[in-house]
Structure formats: structure tokens, C-alpha cells
Image: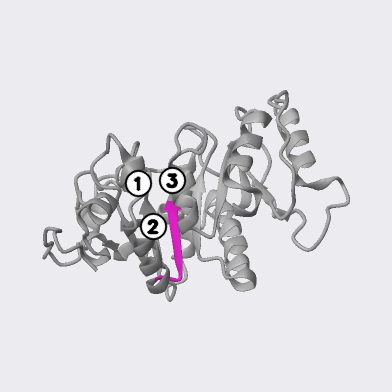
């Protein structure tokens, strides 16, 4: 529902054809080379999200990271693309990083439908006004819109929850690319509109302390899983404490051991809890 004073947007829903897009980023393997080894890694991630959807009803997933440069946007797009490979599945990808939007750029859609999330939150546009259809990928997206100087104020709008509630009703899965957790407060606001977060961890850069702080900021119950990016091992499905205590000491100890093996286990933060898992793989984002 538009606010009474909102400007009217009357265009039809934009549809991007193959020749409308510039070059798609070659890291988007689920869109370009879905049967490659890297594409299969994301299919494993898709399987885990589908399993959570079946068992616990998870359908709106935020993708974030402790800091910039960890590969969250590439992972978010690839996850959305993997889910959309089931042609009967309706998938929406939302770029909610209003500070450093990157979804349009990676999809080769710079300048295409610039309204996006900003128009919904700031001007009362409807979802139909801002959704961009990508039929060649069976995918719908909502761009961020113009970069904002004060995005936190926009995200605090009650329209955020209205937008997320409608997206949840209309789509089987909603994947949300969010800002990094630590540097800015935006994820704290976005958190109430998603079922949980997948956290992208740079296996050769992220200190344990920063990862622990990320989990503490979001709340352990909001962390659906950890994805170790740029790891040197094939991706592995491994969920900790999904059905009970982990006999080896819990996911936190395993994460610390994993980061120490990669030379970044000298942080002194200590997250604690259960219910979280990890994926790792050299096929995940570069």
C-alpha cells in the first residue's frame, strides 16, 4: 500500500532480456556455468537452505559478513541462482546494502530500474514498481536504488516490514544481500525482517574475534550457518548441533580450530551456542 503522499509509479514491471544486460560477472557460476564444479558447491548450499525451509519454515535469508570484501554479494546472487534452477520455484533477490550496492553491477544491470528498495522505503513504491524480472535465470530482483547517505534512517521505516511481509507471501525464497554486520548498524534493523543469516567468513582473513562479535551482534538464534569462503578444501555439508549437543565441543570450537589452521585463529573473542553449521569450499566465491 502506498503512503498517501507518495508519488505514483505507473511503469510496468521491467523485464530484462539477454541482450539488455551487460557482461554478467563470471563469478556468478549458478547463472553462467551451473554444472561446473563451482556451481555444484552452491547447489550444496541450496540443498541446505531447502532443508531448513522444509524442516523449520525458513524462507527469507539474509547474507552478510563481518566486514567488506568477504564475498557476501557474490554468494547471495549464486544462492538465489541455485534456488531458481528449480523452474517452479519463485525466488526474489533483494539488494539491501544501501551503502555499497553491488547486485546490479554484478548482474550487468548498471542503470537499469534505479528506484529499488529506496523507492519502497522512502517514497512508498510497491513491490511491483521496483521488481526486475530476469526470465533467462528464472529470477526476480529488487535493486537497492540510489546510494544513500543515511540508509539507517530509511531502514527504520515501517515500510521495511511491509515490504518483507509481502515478499514472503509472494515468493518461495527471498535472499537478501545486506551490509556487513560490524561496521554499520543496518543489519540490526534488517534482522527483524529475515528468518536468519548466512555469514560469509573469509577463511584466510577473518579473525575469530570478528566472527564472534558478528554472532553476538546478530544473536546466535539468527545465524543459520557459516560459509568459509576462499578455503582450500572442497565444500562439505556439516551442520553442528541441529538435533543436540556436538560431542566434539560445539561449532564454536570447530570454527576456532578451522581459522587457526588458516592462520587467523589468534582472535580472543568467544562466541558460544549451538544450531549453526558451516560450509567451506574453494568453489565458493572468489
The crowd level at tag 3 (other Cα within 10 Å; few <14, some 14-19, many 20+) is: many
Which residues make up the magenta segment?
A: 171-176
Q: Is residue 188 left or right of residue 109?
A: right
- Of mark 1 and mark 2, the one earlier in the sequence is 2
Numbered circle sitting on residue 61: none
Image disc number at residue 103: 1
Q: Is residue 77 visible?
A: no
x and y percentages locating residue 147 in the rendered image: 26, 38
- Whichever of labels 3 and 2 marks the residue nearer the N terminus, that label is 2
Calculate the distance from the C-alpha at mark 3 to the C-alpha at mark 2.
11 Å
Residue at figure coordinates x 64%, y 54% from the top left: 221
Q: Provide residue 273's location: percent of width, then percent of height.
A: 74, 48
Label 2 residue SS: strand
Colouring mode (rainbow / by chain / secondary structure / one colour)? one colour
Q: Is residue 130 magenta-colored?
A: no
Residue identifier under label 2 = 93
Q: Nearer the viewer, residue 188 or 41?
A: 188
Question: Is mark 1 in CB contact (under 8 Å) with mark 2?
Answer: yes
Give 156 or 260, whichever is nearer the viewer. Answer: 156
N-term mark: 3 or 1: 1
The N terminus sits in image quarter: bottom left
Say which residue label 3 marks.
178
In this view, the mark in front (3 or 2): 3
Residue at the extreme right of the image, as rendered:
247
Amino acid at each position: 500500500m502506498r503512503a498517501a503522499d507518495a508519488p505514483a509509479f505507473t511503469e510496468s514491471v521491467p523485464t530484462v532480456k539477454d541482450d539488455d544486460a551487460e557482461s554478467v560477472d563470471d563469478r556468478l557460476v549458478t547463472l553462467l556455468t551451473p554444472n561446473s564444479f563451482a556451481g555444484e558447491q552452491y547447489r550444496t548450499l541450496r540443498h541446505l537452505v531447502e532443508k531448513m525451509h522444509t524442516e523449520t519454515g525458513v524462507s527469507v535469508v539474509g547474507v552478510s559478513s563481518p566486514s567488506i570484501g568477504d564475498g557476501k554479494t557474490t554468494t547471495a546472487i549464486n544462492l538465489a541462482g541455485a534456488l531458481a534452477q528449480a523452474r517452479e520455484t519463485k525466488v526474489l533477490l533483494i539488494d539491501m546494502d544501501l551503502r555499497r550496492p553491488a547486485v546490479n553491477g554484478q548482474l550487468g544491470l548498471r542503470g537499469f530500474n534505479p528506484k529499488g528498495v529506496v523507492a519502497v522505503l522512502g517514497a512508498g513504491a510497491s513491490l511491483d514498481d521496483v521488481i526486475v524480472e530476469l526470465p533467462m535465470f528464472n529470477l526476480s530482483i529488487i535493486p537497492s536504488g540510489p546510494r544513500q547517505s543515511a540508509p539507517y534512517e530509511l531502514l527504520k521505516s515501517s515500510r521495511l516490514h511491509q515490504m518483507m511481509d509481502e515478499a514472503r507471501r509472494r515468493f518461495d525464497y527471498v535472499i537478501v544481500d545486506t551490509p556487513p554486520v560490524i561496521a554499520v548498524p543496518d543489519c540490526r534493523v534488517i534482522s527483524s525482517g529475515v528468518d536468519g543469516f548466512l555469514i560469509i567468513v573469509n577463511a584466510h582473513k577473518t579473525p575469530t574475534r570478528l566472527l564472534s562479535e558478528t554472532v553476538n551482534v546478530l544473536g546466535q538464534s539468527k545465524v543459520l550457518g557459516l560459509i568459509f569462503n576462499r578455503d582450500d578444501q572442497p565444500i562439505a555439508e556439516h551442520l553442528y548441533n541441529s538435533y543436540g549437543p556436538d560431542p566434539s565441543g560445539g561449532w564454536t570450537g570447530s570454527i576456532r580450530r578451522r581459522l587457526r589452521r588458516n592462520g587467523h585463529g589468534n582472535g580472543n573473542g568467544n562466541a558460544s551456542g549451538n544450531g549453526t553449521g558451516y560450509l567451506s569450499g574453494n568453489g565458493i566465491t572468489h
